[in-house]
Structure formats: structure tokens, C-alpha cells
Amino acid sequence: MAENDKLVIAGREFNSRLMVGTGKYANYQQMVQALEASGAEIITVAVRRVNISDRNKESLLDYIDTKKYTLLPNTAGCYTAEDAIRTCRLAREAGLSDFVKLEVLGDEKTLFPDNEELLKAAAVLVKDGFTVLPYTSDDPIVCKRLEDLGCAAVMPLGAPIGSGLGIRNPFNIQIIMESVKVPVIVDAGVGTASDAAIAMELGCDGVLMNTAIAGAQNPVAMAEAMNLAVRAGRLAYLSGRIPRKLYATASSPLAGLVA
Amino acid sequence: MAENDKLVIAGREFNSRLMVGTGKYANYQQMVQALEASGAEIITVAVRRVNISDRNKESLLDYIDTKKYTLLPNTAGCYTAEDAIRTCRLAREAGLSDFVKLEVLGDEKTLFPDNEELLKAAAVLVKDGFTVLPYTSDDPIVCKRLEDLGCAAVMPLGAPIGSGLGIRNPFNIQIIMESVKVPVIVDAGVGTASDAAIAMELGCDGVLMNTAIAGAQNPVAMAEAMNLAVRAGRLAYLSGRIPRKLYATASSPLAGLVA
Amino acid sequence: MAENDKLVIAGREFNSRLMVGTGKYANYQQMVQALEASGAEIITVAVRRVNISDRNKESLLDYIDTKKYTLLPNTAGCYTAEDAIRTCRLAREAGLSDFVKLEVLGDEKTLFPDNEELLKAAAVLVKDGFTVLPYTSDDPIVCKRLEDLGCAAVMPLGAPIGSGLGIRNPFNIQIIMESVKVPVIVDAGVGTASDAAIAMELGCDGVLMNTAIAGAQNPVAMAEAMNLAVRAGRLAYLSGRIPRKLYATASSPLAGLVA
Amino acid sequence: MAENDKLVIAGREFNSRLMVGTGKYANYQQMVQALEASGAEIITVAVRRVNISDRNKESLLDYIDTKKYTLLPNTAGCYTAEDAIRTCRLAREAGLSDFVKLEVLGDEKTLFPDNEELLKAAAVLVKDGFTVLPYTSDDPIVCKRLEDLGCAAVMPLGAPIGSGLGIRNPFNIQIIMESVKVPVIVDAGVGTASDAAIAMELGCDGVLMNTAIAGAQNPVAMAEAMNLAVRAGRLAYLSGRIPRKLYATASSPLAGLVA
């Protein structure tokens, strides 16, 4: 059943629905092992952390096999549309990728997205020919607008970056899935394996995470756990779960999310 | 990390922490495929459904490779201690096993356990030399008493049998784990993959399920999903998840279960 | 609408659906003010804390106007059926009441009920002519048995005594309400006003609490809050709430508890 | 304790923290009774439903005692900043009020706010001298910006308008309360009394609702329930609730929201 179940973003096919970040690891070796254990095919890297100007110095990219992984440069640390646009252009000039994970943050404390600036940046970048995957809040109106602007996917947060709270509002995620046709990828908030499984069971197309893996006591083992969890959740979604009932012989199922 | 992580019940070691039932499948072939996909090593069978008296007729057991799987006969359909005790003895006489999953049900509607009768039956069966794994409610006092009587594990329900509601009261499960030293196996209530992962993330030793797999639209795929989910949840538990916080830079973690 | 909405227990009518305890207050004066603010008509007192043998000494009862309140002696601190039965008989001999709140605790740590002993005690006390209101776990089978034994109500816990966790398993409370005809009173676990409102909105007949009020920073104000909350929850239950939907124009309601 | 606890918006004091709408009632008489039962002092009316141009015809306003209630005209039905701005100006010209509840909706299906347009409209209206109370999503960045623009309060949704789902993401509401100094009023999503109590227990300054009351089977009784619930929740918040613990003798409290 799972064999032909591909994630398709902007015409490109992926077998894994888990995307992972590259920050916060103890060292590059640990990062490499965690990437491997995660089974991810798409790896996001902060453009700011890649030494673009002087590639003679050691760089994160020296440790990532770009034949094996699809690089997804991101604009972490950008707080305005202008800054994010410039960062994407730099990444392209440095030959990183046309795929970008667009982040425009609203403040340093919560790392919530600034959707106003995000929409401005997305409009420009799509026109510039980028394949834009925007990190946004779980707001159906913003997600629809991002799709209308030509974004290749929408990436609503499950909870604040690094919070580990899981998907706090599955109802909004469900409404977003009703509202857009592009892939919906939960980005941020996952804390443990079941959070990732829940995202997939809701019908999301993928999950992106960083802190949940890199910040675990054993990041490599947690990366494997997430690998298994995303596959478990996706397979459960495809398998058609039993209805929820108060007890087995109850006459009517409990519809909707009972969370 | 997971290699040396064995489930030990009454001195016997198992690699899989998922136990599955054999009821409600469309046919034996589907059951066999689902058992295989689940990766389970312990398979529970209702003694009432095994044709013990006349083994010439077709039987569930003809389809289960007892070299590969550990059979766990259960007393499904018993509503009194007396009935459950007799059923276990019949199973032993027929050569099924000394391991028994003890169920004494309180009513036909909800299939909740009758803990009073359960305790009576457990006391007798332990003295009879059975290795008793009792299905019970999520009641720490009853679980402690079952352990004191000599049961090899306790199997509190996550939710009513066949309800698919997941673990409705993780707090009670956590108190049970504080209260007993024998393995705690969540039995009943799981509906989808994340439910199984959550049980393992709580620190439970295993999960037992039947309807969630057999009742899915694609039971074989759901069995695989559960296989992955139990491993994901266990691995996440062992990996040491990140703390929950309101946002990443919040000064204090949100302790406890934020469910 | 609320005028004719009476709580009826064993033929006696009450206007308030909130019952409160008398322990853990800073002093008797504070207790008296909190009782008053709560609007409760039924007040439970631990028989062990009433100086039955020597009524010349100061006693809790000196502070409670027994013309105004219905006293409900309880067996707090009893760990066996025998002890609880003896305590009830002492209370009756001392002229306290025939109404008793029956508690038989399973351990000192969690204060969970010991349902086995509870059932034994209930059987004896009902035959003795007591009006028995038993504190029990949220177990539908035990609740049904308590009703069958002749108890005048059942009082399942919402969460452990003093935990303040609210109703952890509204599903079980709902099944209990389906299972018995006597009043269902949530006893223990309430932490704040909304917890009490939720109990009433589920359709429970009443709520009993102590720590949530006595342990608050301002017990008298919290007593008033609980008074309002129980009335709010009951009135909301009677008023017929709107269905839950993903959004207002969604075609199908989200049935069941979305908690 | 509650006597001096006033809600202050733009320098004006209110005793009630419940604000109610005027739509969806069976008739004006029912509306009037529900308003009365709610105890609300601030009543929101859709400018579009008031017959501004021809005040000789029957109007909603003929039924509302504007000496008793503070009118809060709202821009329901506006989908652009321009439309909302024009609507507010019309309301002012007609003598309705300088206080406005600003709604700019993103679509007709979900009635989610369009925050981009909302921010534009808010900027203009504040400069125009209006006291602006904007309906927005539970987005801390947007709420902070609305405050910075000079809005007198922020009114994040608890759940979609008319959904009755309660506060789906109390974490976001909590972050919003950390982020802004103006009053935080939960607007939309409340379904029943406990939802309103929960909003107040979180520390919100007020709650605004319409469908939960007008759509109940008995709107007048539900209005009274909400009146009680808002007071209960506020009083519980002020009273200092007991900490959540796994059980009373547990050594550490369960911090954060255990929802």
C-alpha cells in the first residue's frame, strides 16, 4: 500500500514524508547520523548558517550528501520580507536551491511567523521563480492566500517552534486541508513520536521538525522514532481506522476529533 | 538502542511490545497476514473460539504457527470468576498454554471488566500455576492487588474494548506504573497508530489490541502501522523527549501531561 | 427554568447541586464563610474529626447550623469495610445522620477507593438502614453494582482526591450515567470552576468537593465561584447547547465529547 | 472581592465581562430577554442589520435600551478593509457609537478573520478617532500589532464563529496575554458555559458571544448560564486555584495547562 504513496511537491516526488532541520546538534557527526536515521529526503538548512561567501571555511554543507538529500534552504532569522527575499536570492546565487522554506518571524521570543511580511515575501519570491514553502500559523485564510500566490505547499505550525507541544489545534489543520489543494506540511511544534503520527493521521502530507530530534537526549534514536512514527501515522491514515464509539456496541460513532 | 530492549513477562523475553488478537477478521488468511505484518510475538486467542473438544474440525489454531508465536489463550466471553477459571483449565488440558489473558467481563454492553470477579479468578489461577495476565480497568488499587496476588503483568484498559478512543486517562496509567513493578500493558481502547505510540511514550511495557487492526478498512496495512507505531513510541520514550514549553524561550517547562 | 429543578436523593429534595466538605480550612470561621458562600445544602463531615465521645469539647459541629445544612457524615480515613461500617454506626449512635458518604480508601498515597471493600461495606450498611452515598472510581460496573445493592446515589471520582485535575475521563462518567438510575454525583478531582461546570454539563446530578475550595488562596471567593459554576453548568445543560461544528456552515456536527 | 473588579476598555469601566451579540434570535422579544438575562453591559450590533438610512422602519435599535447598554457596532459581513472602514463611518454618522467591533472576514465558509485587511482597517480607523476592538485569530504577532496600532483591546477567536468548539488553543491565548497590555477578550467559539468559564480562568478580560446563546434551545436560560459562568470563571481566577497534581500527595505539581 505504501509503495506508491509519494509526497509530491512542485512536481517532485519523495518517498519520505518527514523533513528535518540541521540546527542544534552537538556536532556535525551527530547531525549526520540523525539525518540518516530519520530517513528524510528533504533537509532544511538555514542560509545564515551556511558560509556562502567563503566556501573555503568549514560549512554545514560539507557534511550533507547533496546527491542523497534535497536541500531546502530556509530564511531562519529573517524578520522582514525584504530580509527574507534577499536571503533567498543569496542562496540561489550560491547555488543552493530554488526550493526555499520561507520563514519571516514576528518576534524573537515566540518565533511565531509574521504573516503580513510572509505574504509580501512569498509574492515576490514566487514571481522570482522560487519554489516557495512558507512557514505560517495555522490560519486557513493565510494558507489559502499563500496558495493563491503560487506557493508550492503550506507549512502551518503545530505549535510554536521548539515548544514540543504537538498539534495544539488539529481543527485548524483540518480546515486548512479543506481550504487548499497544495500539500499541507506541519512545521514546528512536534515534541515526540505520537505528535508526528497524529499529524499524518489528520491527513497532512508531511511533517517538518528540528528541535524534537536535535534536542532529545538521544537525537539519533529520536530521529529513528520519528521516521517510524511518520510512516505509522501515514499508513494508519491510509488504512481507514475504526470509528470512535463510547463503547463497541454503542449505536452511534463519536464523529470528529476526540482529542 | 532498541536491540537490548526486551519485554520480559514471567521470565520470558520478547522483542515486540505489541500483542494482537485474532478475532473479527474477514477470514483466516487476512488474519494470518495481519499477524505477520504486526510483528507481534504474542497472539491472544479466545478459548471459546478454539474447537478444543473436536480438533478434527477446522480451528483457528490451524492457521497460527505456534513455533513462531507465543499463544496467549484468553477468557473472552466469561462473566464470572468460576467460568473464567474453568475456561483456563480447559485451555491448559487441551495443551494450549499456561499463559492466560484473564478477562472477566461485567456486562455485554460495555465489556468493562468486573474487577471483583477478576480478583477472585486471579487468586485461584495463580495458585493453580497459571501465568496470569489480567485485563482490568485503569484502577491503581486493583492493579496493585493483582500484582500482590502474583499476576505476571497488569493489563489496564485505555478505553472500552472496541471503542477506538485511545488512552482516555493517561494520568491513571501513570499512577498504575508508579504503583506496580510488573509490566503494565495497555489492553483495549486503541483506535489508531498514535494511540499505540502514546501508550509506549507514557512508559507502558506493551500494548494489546484487536479491533483497531481487524476492524480497519485495511487490516493488514493497519497491522503494519501499529507495528511501526509501537516501535516509534518505545524508541521515543527511550530517547528522552524535549520538555514541553509554551514557546522555545519560555523560562519554565510545562510539566506533566499536556494532553 | 431552574426553579423546579431539584436534586432528589432518597426522596429528599435539594435546591443546590453542590456539596462541600469541611476539612483543610485555616479555621472554623473561614469554613463557615465558605459554606455560606458555596450555597451548598449538604455538608459532609469526617466522622473521625467529630468529637463524638466527648461532646463537651469544641467540635466541628458547633460551627455548623444543622437546621440549615443537611449533614452527610463520611468515613474518611477508613481502609477496610469493617472500619467503615463501624464508623457509620458510631455516627448514627451519636445522632449524626442516617445519610452517609461511604469512603473505603485503597491507599494513603493516592486515596483511590478500594471498590472491593466498598461493595462489602455498602451491602451491610444498606441492610442496616443507612442511606448510602458511596465514593467510587469511574467504573460503570462498580457503579451499577452499588445501585443494585441499594445505594441512594453513586459518587464516582473525577480525578484523585485533592488532585485538582478536573474530570479526566468524561467518557466513563457518561457511561455511568447510561448505566444507573440513581443520581450520579462527581466526587473528587475538581480544581476550578470550569471543572464543576463541565460535570454538570455532562448531565451529572451534583458535584462534591473540598480541597478545591479549602485549598484555594481565597477559599470564600472560590466557594462562591463554585456556587456560580455549578448553577451555570446545570443551566447550560438544561438549555440545550448548540452543536459542535468545525465551523458554523459545516454540514455535519462533531458528535460526542470534543474535550 | 468581585466588587472592585472592573473591566476597563479605553478608560470606560464595566462590571460585566460578558459581551453579547444580537443576531440569530427567533424574535426581538427573545433577544431582549436574553440580553437582560446575560447581565451584559456591552451589546454588539451589526451595522448592516440596523436600518440606518430609514429610521422610520422597525429597527433592532428600537428594542435596545441605549441608556442601559453600551452599543458596540460591528462590521459583520465586511470582507475588505475598505468596506469595514466605510461601515464604521456610516455607523458614526448615524450616531451609533465611536466604539466599534472591527471584523474583516476572510471567507464566507469559515468566517475566519482576514488579518491583513484587518490591520489595514484598524490603522485607518484608529487615526479616524474610533475606539477599535478587532476580532482576530489567536495569533500573538497580529494581536501585538493591533495593540501597537492603537486598538483598545484585542479579540482573538477561541474557535470559528458559530462552531461551539470552545477555546481550542488556550496556549495561544496565554501567549497573547503575555504579549499585549490591552484587554484580551475571547470572541467567537464559545459553545457552553464551561467554555466561557475557561476563558476567564485563563485570565482573559472578557468574553464575547452570540451563537452560543441565540442558538441554544432555550436562549434566555443559556444567557443566564453564561452570565453565571463568566462570573464563576473570573472569581475562580481571582481566588487562586489549587495546583494540579497527579494525586494529592504527589511531590510536584503538574505545571501549565492540563487540558
Image (tube, coloured by chain):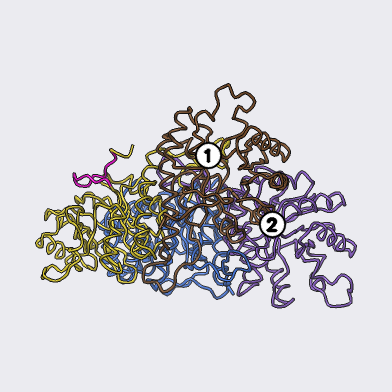
Chain colours: A yellow, B brown, C purple, D blue
Horizontal side of residue B112 vs D196, given as left or right = right
Query: Total number of numbered labels?
Result: 2
Q: Chain of mark 1?
A: B
Q: Amino acid at mark 2?
A: Arg
Element class at badge 2: loop
Horizontal side of residue D64 vs A46, given as left or right = right
Residue C127 at x, y percent in the picture: 86, 49
Q: Compared to D99, does D160 lie above or below?
A: above
Q: Which residues are magenta?
A: A4-15
Q: Which residue is more in the foreground, C244 or D131? A: C244
State yes or no: residue A7 in magenta.
yes
Horizontal side of residue B169 vs A119, given as left or right = right
Element class at badge 1: strand
Residue D178 at x, y percent in the picture: 40, 71
**Residue D26 appears anywhere in the view:** no
Q: Residue at x 52, y 69 (%)?
A: D15
Residue position marked by numbered label 1 in the rendering: B43
State yes or no: residue A128 in magenta.
no
Residue position marked by numbered label 2 in the rendering: C17
Instruction: State the image quarter where residue C66 is shown.
Output: bottom right
Residue B180 at x, y percent in the picture: 61, 58
Q: Residues within 10 Å of mark 1 (few under 14, many from 20)?
A: many
Residue C17 at x, y percent in the picture: 69, 57
Q: Which residue is more in the foreground, B48 or C2? A: B48
